[in-house]
Amino acid sequence: MGARPDEGGGEEEVDDLGRDDRRTESDGSPLDAERGDSVEQVEMKKEERNFDQDGDDIIDEEEEEEDEEEDPLWDAPKLAKKLSEKLSREPINIRVHDIQIRGTVKTRESVLEAQLQEVKRAESMQELLQESVKANARLRGLGVFEKCTITIDAGPEELPGTANVTVEVEETKRPFSGDLGVFSKPETKTWTLDGTVKWKNLMGYGETVDATGCYGWDTTSELSAGVNYPRFHGLQSSLISRATILTQDWQKYSSYRERLKGFSLGLINDDKHDLSYNLTWRELEDPTRQASHAIRRQLGHHLLSSVKYTFKVDGRDSAMRPTRGFAFTSSSQLAGLGPDEKLLRFARQEVELRYAVPLGFLSGALNFGAAGGIIMPWGPSFLSKSTPISDRYFMGGHTSLLGNLKGPSALLGFRTRGVGPNAARLIPQTTGQTEAGAEERPRMVDTLGGDLAASGFVDLSMDLPFRILREWGIHMHGFACAGNLVPLTGEDRPSWSWRGFLDTFRVSCGAGLVFPTKLFRLEVNYCYILRKQEQDRAKRGIQVSLTSPR
């Protein structure tokens, strides 16, 4: 067998076992050159798929060799799968090089930049993806954009381990909106007509300007206007300012009418935290001139300067008919901020807890609730000072036990403001024109409320065994509730003890039907009073309760 030189000038050698050992120089055959070009293409694609800052390849060496043998071209689905596996295995270090914003016409770019701060601070691919999703939700929540898309691309070639973020938005063509609705006020057994007009992005800062009007027959009227700035000047939350004129009529229960003119400034406002400052000029008057002496001492003009913080978490699956989860809220208020001695000075603390447990049959659930609150004046001789009646706690009424968290107020079977101490109203002078033989009216009283309040309830709900009722969401429930309130300060304060406070708890129970709607939750209950005090105003029998979803 003759020997011949190869094309590269090398020699062919034969070993003792008869096997060839070929050594080629850089100048190979056309097939070798083509194979070399294919390998070079694979290497280029491997470099483009490199997301590690340290230069490590995402694809393992063994997998790369298989790709070279099967298909030297870039397989996008396979790369996406391997990239997903890489993201789930370990963090991929990366930093954002640039954020580009496109599509804004009226909105200032600083509004979007404020919502993208967390995206720019991302240090890994996983964190960048998560923050991009959150930023997209925040931008859509502004109500200024109809569309919002966030795209992540590779950074410049000279800056490995970087990414560019592109935000494309489309501004809404209809920035104004309006709402009109009828809502219930169970505490006064009345309805209110509410209307709201909103204009978004008026000045290009993503702000929402709104005006609200509320009219309640014989009870409440309100006019207010406010502005909401999202993440104002780099703040972590929105800045909310509001001016309000409010009139509330409590003559039927406590012989006074309240007028408020105030301004509020929300410093922190998100899903869990709310911090606000309120400056309110308050006027209490007695149009009938029959208020009790305890109410007369509260009449006149007062200035309220306070700061209020609320923490709230709600993990229930529904507020109107919860079947699982819990909710908790804590509210703290400090009033009297300022040098004026005539400022209302008090501290108020309130907590509430709800918990729902599913039963596993007939969509049944067991709901528990407990709430407590206390208000105390502060300053010299604070025990001899009375707390403002508008800020005290009252119990009773037609409010459902379930629904939104509202503090220690709901107590079914008792009339509105029908629990706790009261004072007799003044008797009007007789005119001598009363009809002979007319029955003497019972003497009217003013409900005074309490400084310390506590309440709790348990509610068992389940579906009815009728298909048509289940389709409409109509179900039955049984309940038991208890509560109490007492005054702690003032010149006429009674002596009290914790034992006496617990022994005088009011207790009621009952059952009824629930008719849920989109506007409210309607309950028709039969209430039975288990324990009440002599001065309480309670009623055994049928009671209708309403709760609005807001």
Image (tube, helix red, strand yellow):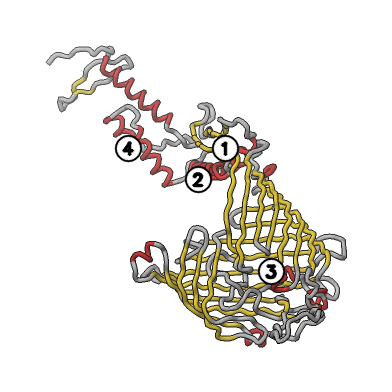
Q: CA distance from mark 2 to mark 3?
A: 37 Å
Judge whether 359 appears above or below 65 on screen. Answer: below
Q: CA distance from mark 4 to mark 2?
A: 31 Å
Camera-near label (2 vs 1) is: 1
Q: CA distance from mark 2 to mark 1?
A: 30 Å
Specify the amino acid type for callout 4. Answer: Glu
Observer-nearest of 371 and 76? 371
Q: Earlier in the sequence, mark 2 or mark 1?
A: 2
Residue lying at 59% horizontally and 46% vertically, measured from the top left: 178
Q: Earlier in the sequence, mark 2 or mark 3?
A: 2
Q: Earlier in the sequence, mark 4 or mark 2?
A: 4
Q: CA distance from mark 3 to mark 1?
A: 42 Å
Residue 62 image label:
4
Specify the amino acid type for callout 2. Answer: Gln
CB-based contact (under 8 Å), mark 4 and mark 3: no
Camera-near label (3 vs 1) is: 1
Residue 349 image label:
3
Secondary structure type for disc 2: helix
Q: Residue 10 location, x and y as percent?
A: 27, 15
Q: Earlier in the sequence, mark 4 or mark 3?
A: 4
Query: Quadrant of the image for the N terminus?
Result: top left
Q: CA distance from mark 1 to mark 4?
A: 57 Å
Secondary structure type for disc 4: helix
Q: Which residue is mark 1?
A: 174
Label 3 environment density (alpha carbons within 10 Å; few <14, some 14–19, many ≥20): some
Specify the amino acid type for callout 1. Answer: Arg
Name which quarter of the figure residue 8 lies in: top left
Label 1 environment density (alpha carbons within 10 Å; few <14, some 14–19, many ≥20): few
Specify the amino acid type for callout 3. Answer: Gln
CB-based contact (under 8 Å), mark 2 and mark 1: no
Residue lying at 82% horizontally and 75% vertically, measured from the top left: 385
Q: Earlier in the sequence, mark 1 or mark 4?
A: 4
